[in-house]
Image (cartoon, rainbow, N blue to C red):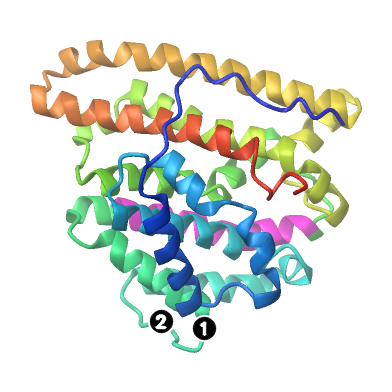
Amino acid sequence: MSDDSSLQIPFPHRRSSHIPHAAALHRDWLHRHPLLPDADRTGYAHWEIVELAALGYPDAGPDDLALAADLMGFYFLFDDQFDGPLGRRPTEVAPICERLIAVLHGARADQRSPVETAFADLWNRSARGMPARWQARAAYNWEWYLASHPAEAAGRISTRPPDRAGYLALRRGTAAMETIFDMVERLGQFEVPPAVLHHPVLRQLRQLAADIPSLSNDVRSFPLEAPRGDVNNLVLIVQRERRCSAEEACAVVLDEAQIMVERCGELHAQLPEVYRELGLSRVEASIAQRYADGLLTWLAGYQHWESRTGRYHSV
């Protein structure tokens, strides 16, 4: 398969200057919540998780950047526990996820479970100081992410491969992008006015910015996922649709993602007119623009990280 799997991203990426501070705090966090076996620590270092946080949220303060790094680490390490035999046993995956969903709604974490203590810590730090409306939305998005994992496990043992609609329904849950975008507000200490947050233009922009990393990640991770029976990958779906090679399917998926990138730019350019049509105040428009810019900053930063990280490349 070709190594030319990078999208052309017209939006600039930026990097926080607080990486050393956040890296030290992230190491401490991993020690307090041992999600990672000692034998895996060297490999994890090559994933450059703090770098991803610094590229995704370049304007976050030092401690908030550490929170972002801890979140990134949790996503990857939580997902990776399902890569082996456990990921083919949905009846065992479901209780793990249900306990974390209960934590969202006030249950105490089991102190014997690093996954539960890590998640409780992340949720408490994320929600602290945020308005009730944001917390409700963020809790729903976390529940969506967590509750998608049993379905993903069931898909690995199903005789019914997903079609595009089924792929999108599940991938948009397991990708966790809505929770990642909620953190644009949390780390910026603002809340987007509901009228613009749910406006069709901004909703389309958010959905595209969420879907593009999933498509590019499907191409990057295809060589790892296909041998272990993961079916929720668009490369596999395109192969079936077109009866083509894996390399051809990867090219198709990247072409689709590139079109989506260009559409992001078009939608972003429409936002000032949306603000005027909604009658937003200067402050409200500024907040909405910070959020929209944050979506594209994340997209650009993620693509820069994904093309270099040791998680998908030999080191």
> Which residue corresponds to the image point at 83% horizontal and 54% vertical from the top-left?
229
Q: Quadrant of residue 255?
A: top right
Residue positioned most to the bottom:
112
Badge 1 density bin: few <14, some 14–19, many ≥20, Cα 10 Å: few
Q: Quadrant of residue 43?
A: bottom right
Indicate the amino acid at tag 1.
Ser
Indicate the amino acid at tag 2.
Ala
Asked if the magenta segment contains residue 142, the reply would be: yes
> Which residue corresponds to the image point at 41% horizontal and 81% vertical from the top-left?
109
Q: Which residue is mark 1?
A: 113
Q: Position of residue 147 (x, y in %)?
A: 53, 61
Q: Are marks 2 and 1 in contact (CB under 8 Å)?
A: yes
Q: Is residue 165 visible?
A: no
Image height check: is 118 above or below 223?
A: below
Image height check: is 99 above or below 313?
A: below
Q: Which residue is mark 2?
A: 109
> Which residue corresponds to the image point at 53% horizontal and 69% vertical from the top-left?
97
